[in-house]
Image (cartoon, helix red, strand yellow):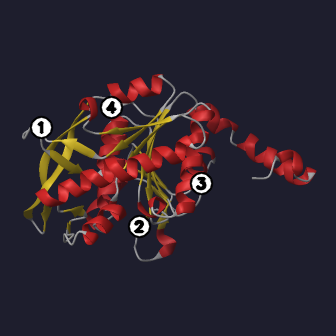
Amino acid sequence: MTDIQDTPAEVAAQKATTLIESLPWLKKFRDQIVVIKYGGNAMVSEELQDAFAQDIAYLRYVGVMPVVVHGGGPQISNMLQRLEIPSEFKGGYRVTNTEAISVVRMVLTGQVNPQLVSKINSHGPIATGLSGEDAGLFGGRRRGVVIDGEEVDLGRVGDVVEVDPTPVLDHLAAGRIPVVSSIAPDLDHPGQSLNVNADAAAAALAVSLHARKLVILTDVPGLYADWPHRDSLVSHLTSEALIEMLPKLESGMIPKMRACLDAVEGGVDAAAIIDGRVPHSVLVELFTSKGIGTEVVLGKSEVTG
């Protein structure tokens, strides 16, 4: 990284201008909780992992209170393949049997979580790992999914139905960044764990924390009103407009947009899906006026391209 003192005066002035342009957004988000769901390609590229860790550390050092929730889709699929356990998805959700839940838990809490915590902590001892099973953070109940009008069993898959934000708030009060893995205890079957969708878990946690914003990293630039037409990218829409669009969305996009909807209907000011394949996309979304993806806010039907 080039020191600003070692750059030509014109370049230094441009950098200073960029910093000043972020001032209104720094003021807006200072001392505010922002929940960021980490997933997709950003989890498997070393360069994107490093950029994400830098973004999260930057937020903490400028006075924002980031909370990271992660899944582990690519890593879970890879481990299941190595162990010759078949992967199956229905309605955008992973089917998880008793054998698979052990792998899910191992990958989330034993691989993805400590790796991300370590990356962030390379910028200072500021991040700490948590599981949704820790101190009653999440409580889950099993769920199925309706496909073509029929309820389909997903196995050890559930919804987050209870959130106790106390352990997260304790870490935030201590100046730390909580990094939460998306697994939850099964409230109806004590001692058993459920694989919960990380997008939905992030939304539930954002609501419980009264977060200012929810940001979900994806592998696409945002929501398309008329996929696959790339000129139909939506930059801003209201909750009412999203409700109208939900039934027509691709199955993989439904959990992400449903999470955004749940967040804003639960009191979060705004929720956004952004392209996690773009380095530093979190900072661009939070500290620029246009952002980088699709932002959802509470309100009547309105869509902005």
> Residue, x 51% and y 73% (percent of image)?
231
Alpha-carbon distance for marks 1 and 3?
38 Å
Pointer 1 or 3: first along the chain:
1
Numbered circle sitting on residue 280: 3
> Residue, x 62% and y 44% (percent of image)?
287
Depth check, front residue: 213 or 236: 213
Secondary structure under badge 4?
helix
Q: What residue is pinned by disc 4?
A: 208
Determine if residue 281 is in view.
Answer: no
Circle 2: is it few (<14), some (14-19), or many (20+) Cα within 10 Å?
Answer: some
Alpha-carbon distance for marks 2 and 3?
25 Å
Depth check, front residue: 94 or 108: 108
Alpha-carbon distance for marks 4 and 3?
27 Å
Are the residues tagged 1 and 2 within 8 Å (C-beta)?
no
- The amino acid on which the numbered mark 3 sits, given as a three-letter code, is His
Circle 1: is it few (<14), some (14-19), or many (20+) Cα within 10 Å?
Answer: some
**Which mark lies nearer to you, 1 or 2?**
1
Q: What residue is pinned by disc 2?
A: 225
Pointer 1 or 2: first along the chain:
1
Alpha-carbon distance for marks 4 and 1?
18 Å
Q: What residue is pinned by disc 1?
A: 187
Alpha-carbon distance for marks 1 and 2?
38 Å
Are the residues tagged 2 and 4 within 8 Å (C-beta)?
no
- The amino acid on which the numbered mark 1 sits, given as a three-letter code, is Leu
Secondary structure under badge 3?
loop
> Residue, x 22% and y 51% (percent of image)?
195
**Which mark lies nearer to you, 2 or 4?**
4
Residue 285 spot, x, y in % from top left:
56, 50
